[in-house]
Amino acid sequence: MTVANSSSEIIYADNAATTKPDAEALALMFELQEKFFANPSSAYKLSRPLKKILQESREKIAACINAKPQEIFFTSGGTESDNWAIKSSVLESLPERPNIITSAVEHKAILNSCAAMKNLGCSVTKLPVDKFGAVNPVDLREKILPQTKIVSVMLANNEVGTIQPVKNLANVAHEHGKIFHSDAVQAVGHIPVDVDEFGVDMLSASAHKFNGTKGVGFLYVRTGLNIAPYIDGGGQEFSRRAGTENVPAVAAMALALEKNCRDMNVTAKKISACEKILLDKLKSNGVDFILNGGDNRLPGHLSLSFKDCDGETLLHRLDLKNICVSTGSACNSQQVQKSHVLQALNISEDYIYGTIRITFGKENSCYEAEIIGESLTDILRTI
Ligand code: PLP
């Protein structure tokens, strides 16, 4: 995707950090913001359309992940959904030292929620991953304890794009009577997500990762799972998530997700072609690099490590050429730190610092992939 900027045009290839809001979804959001300003909880007729829009949005989102509408709870995004799933699953069991099982490659929204619960007396088990970033269900089977309350393993990794064997992991958790949650923030709207087929009990998603807007997302909670509210207040979201609903953003999220799911195969083909063009260009230019994450990855999601390089330098040199990518994961790109994900994958010292993430989205073109490949080659030749 090329973005007009005051001085020149920018190639945006950091879609795992955030995506450009879909134009139709954005237009709908602005229209609703203006027309329907009433509080959806109010009793007069001005509020009725808002209640209807909320319900329709719930139905649309549920249909995209094979859930029931009443199993979708709107939140402020992926971070809140993750905090809710982890914290509410264990808080009631304190101070009996409940256990949480997660993986070594989770997003900080999960890892820091676990760390916060550890400070309150929980124990936390982090499952290792193989060299591609995948968790082995056998490891989970070995680590489950009687006091384990929740197992949380992401569906797709935000740094290297690895897709986890969530269905098998959920099976193992259920064999032991444990709750299974998956952070699907990078996956929803990009690969097929079917909560019934996966057998997950809870699943987190965030609108800005699938061409909705920032500050809105949802937590799927399977019927019958009585997880306590995380945000207390009024009776919104079936009394389980308080706070006046952001109806326009929720409606935009539902539309964006519906469109992404409808176009999923076409988009995947297109961005896989971008990915191939970029990799072929680097190879034909004789560039020495490692592609992290193996073959079972999100389409168009590239984590590339270059020998004896500094990812920050690469990022800034690409930025000078008007190309947006990130180092490690976008959420920690301000910190010059070895990524916990790349460490868990055992990436060697001479490559780990020279890692950048290039993530294509539905608006990128093959021409842009070629420009990125050429620009990267030029930069690597001069440093
Ligand atoms: N989980 C994963 C896997 C993510 O990639 C992100 C964001 O990068 C989050 C959670 C947090 O989502 P949000 O930005 O909506 O808070």
Image (tube, rainbow, N blue to C red):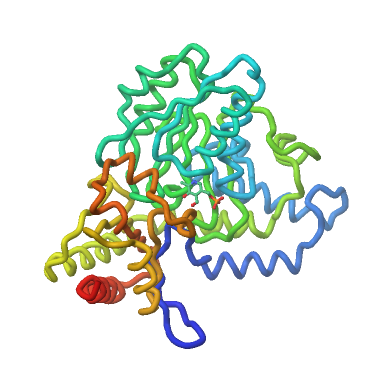
Above or below, 294 relative to 176: below
Above or below, 179 relative to 263: above
Q: Residue 37 appears at what percent x and percent y?
A: 79, 62
Q: Do we see residue 236 in this rendering?
A: yes
What residue is drawn where x is 57% and y is 56%? 253
Q: Residue 74 appears at what percent x and percent y?
A: 64, 45
Which residue is more in the foreground, 251 or 119? Answer: 119
Above or below, 127 relative to 95: below
What residue is drawn where x is 51% and y is 29%? 201
Q: Do we see residue 267 in this rendering?
A: no
Give the quadrant of the N terminus: bottom left
Q: Residue 158 appears at what percent x and percent y?
A: 41, 49
Q: Residue furthest right?
A: 44
Q: Residue furthest bottom?
A: 7
Give the number of marks: 0
Residue 309 sits in quarter = bottom left
Judge from the rendering whether residue 325 lies leftward or rightward of residue 50; answer left or right. Answer: left
Judge from the rendering whether residue 96 lies leftward or rightward of residue 168; answer left or right. Answer: right
Q: Residue 190 appears at what percent x and percent y?
A: 40, 52
What residue is drawn where x is 41% and y is 63%? 14
Give the quadrant of the C terminus: bottom left
Which residue is more in the foreground, 213 or 287? Answer: 287
Judge from the rendering whether residue 1 lies leftward or rightward of residue 284; answer left or right. Answer: right
What residue is drawn where x is 76% and y is 37%? 232
Residue 88 sits in quarter = top right
